[in-house]
Image: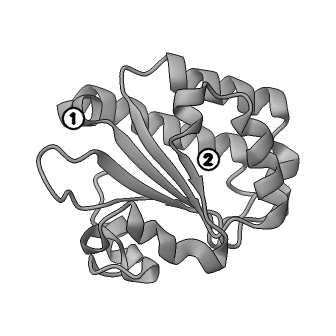
Amino acid sequence: MAPLPSDSELSPWRVILRFKNADPETATAVIVFRAFLMVLDMLTFSDDSFVINGQEIIVDLKGVPYAYVAQVPPTFLKKVINLAIHSYPSRIKSVYYVSVPAFIQAILNILLSLLPEKLKSRVHMFSEKETVNLHKFVPRSILPEEYGGDAGPFNELSSNSKA
């Protein structure tokens, strides 16, 4: 996980979540979700701009192990969605899924049907070939080099992170 640099005081809080090199045996899907929710808790109470300006989340699914899909039953996903929508005093402005494998795109399409229309319109999916389209939504100046941006390598952003 790496928070992206802010391009203005009013810009939403932006983060990239990556599953590259993820090991579902040591970091199960439940542990990954739990860690993300702990970061949300921390930011909700410590950073006013997180709540006021909203969030944009980029989820890079390149190389995500299929074993994660088997670990997450649909009922669990529905609970996580409800928790994110109804339990946090923040506003999700956009979610961008990049490098989406076909098997996950089918699952995401089903999950989208569970979302309210307003939130559904804020979710964008890009296959690996379409990842360049992310620049239409997120400024190139704040994206890591791996995404065609100018903000430096992902690992450097991640290691400089407070989260």
Cβ atoms at labels 2 and 1 below 8 Å apart? no
Which residue occupies the foreground of this view, 17 or 136?
136
Instruction: Of the two numbered discs 2 and 1 on the same chain, state the one appearing first in sequence.
Output: 2
Residue 85 locus on image (x, y percent): 53, 24
Q: What type is the residue that disc 1 sits on?
A: Asp
Residue 121 locus on image (x, y percent): 55, 39
Q: Is residue 69 left or right of residue 32?
A: right
Q: Nearer the viewer, mark 2 or mark 1?
A: 1
Compute the Cα span from label 2 to label 1. Answer: 22 Å
Disc count in the image?
2
| Residue depicted at 19% across the width and 30% down the height | 48
The N terminus sits in image quarter: bottom left
Residue 47's label in the rendered image is: 1
**Label 1 Cα neighbours within 10 Å, binned few <14 / some 14-19 / many ≥20:** few
Q: Is residue 26 left or right of residue 34?
A: right
Residue 117 locus on image (x, y percent): 59, 28
